[in-house]
Amino acid sequence: MSACPRFEHLLVLPHLRVQNANAISSPLTHGFPSITAFLGLMWALERKTRAAGLDLSFKAVGVVCHDHQEQVTEGGYVKAFRLTRNPVGKDGKTQAIVEEGRIHLEISLVFAVSSERWAHTPDAPETDVATVAELLSAMRVAGGSLLAPEQSKRVRYQPFVIDQTGNSDDRREVYSKQRMRLLPGFALVARDDLLEARFGDLKKENPDATRLDAWLSLSRINWQHDATINDGKGGWLNDRTGQGWIVPIPVGYGALGELHDPGVVANARDASTPFRFVESVYSIGQWLSPHRLNEANQLLWYADSHPDDGLYRCRNDYRTAASFEFETDFD
């Protein structure tokens, strides 16, 4: 497993308001956009900055959520997405409704960047940050539209740069002072270690248990009766006590077949890029307040792709996880 690429600066775009972002993060999960959407945003933004003449290399991205409002029906235990009614067709009949999940967000984006010009030109970061913010304002964030800040002149809404040069202690000290500017909010981090631990527990009870069983077990609240508590009267306990805000998340894609040459697959979006059919890869994430993260690497997500193994996934270094088994058999 690789580590987060080296970077010298953190570019923070705080308190962005996003309307109608995609709330369906994968075929099995919803409630917040997939982290792959933010990595895609990072690469698209890097291409725009290069086209604008900026010397910026984007290495990783972190997301802090300050507020969210998923567009679902209210009341009861079962909720449904609020869907749009499409105009009638040419024949006057009702068009089919395609389910789309939407969510309104207030988020802060933290980009890990490197720049030779920033290292030699003191006023370059301030100028470039304004350009990056302007470029981002015209882009889609996880399919949603960026809205103008309500009070853009306030300090909390202004983009800023956190210096991450020097040794590890210097970087940690600078980050610890600036992380408070991301409060109140919650940052999504990877908890592959919890999945491995739950998988080991299930294997003790059932040798045939799989990682899918462990993922499903962690995705729900499991209640169990314990006859030894309450002075022998017994009671019910759940497995979420002390675990924090644990959520199932998609972390990338696994190949379903071999890589096809450009233009071979009909109706592909890009006829000049090799094509591959994939499915979602899942793991476990946790929402944590940024002040509980001791260094920037614990916040950031980066790409860790292994095309030869058919694995394209996102990594986060909050916890060091055991390697996952990923087998491909295309014969």
Image (tube, rainbow, N blue to C red):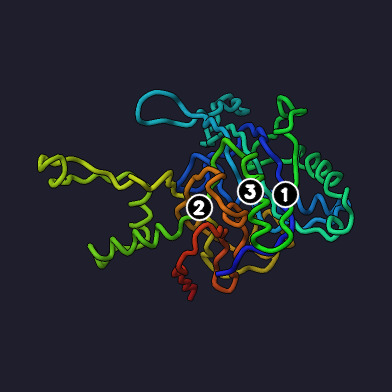
Q: Is residue 227 left or right of residue 317?
A: left
Task: Measure how far apart labels 1 and 2 are at the Cα level.
Answer: 29 Å
- Name the element at disc 1: strand
Label 3 environment density (alpha carbons within 10 Å; few <14, some 14–19, many ≥20): some
Q: Is residue 155 left or right of residue 318?
A: right
Label 2 environment density (alpha carbons within 10 Å; few <14, some 14–19, many ≥20): many
Query: Which badge, 1 or 3, is on the more N-terminal residue?
Result: 3
Residue found at x 37% / y 58%:
212
> Which three-letter amino acid code belongs to the residue tagged 3?
Phe
> Which three-letter amino acid code belongs to the residue tagged 1?
Ile
Residue 225, given in percent of the width and then of the height, sits at 18, 45
Residue 19, given in percent of the width and then of the height, sits at 63, 31
The circle on residue 5 is none
The circle on residue 38 is 3
**169 over 180 or under it: above or below:** below
Whether the residues at callouts 1 and 2 have beta carbons within 8 Å, the answer is no
- Residue nearer the viewer, 324 or 123: 123
Query: Which badge, 1 or 2, is on the more N-terminal residue?
Result: 1
> Which three-letter amino acid code belongs to the residue tagged 2?
Pro
| Residue position for label 1 | 162
| Residue position for label 2 | 250
Query: Which badge, 3 or 2, is on the more N-terminal residue?
Result: 3
Residue found at x 25% / y 67%:
207
- Name the element at disc 3: helix
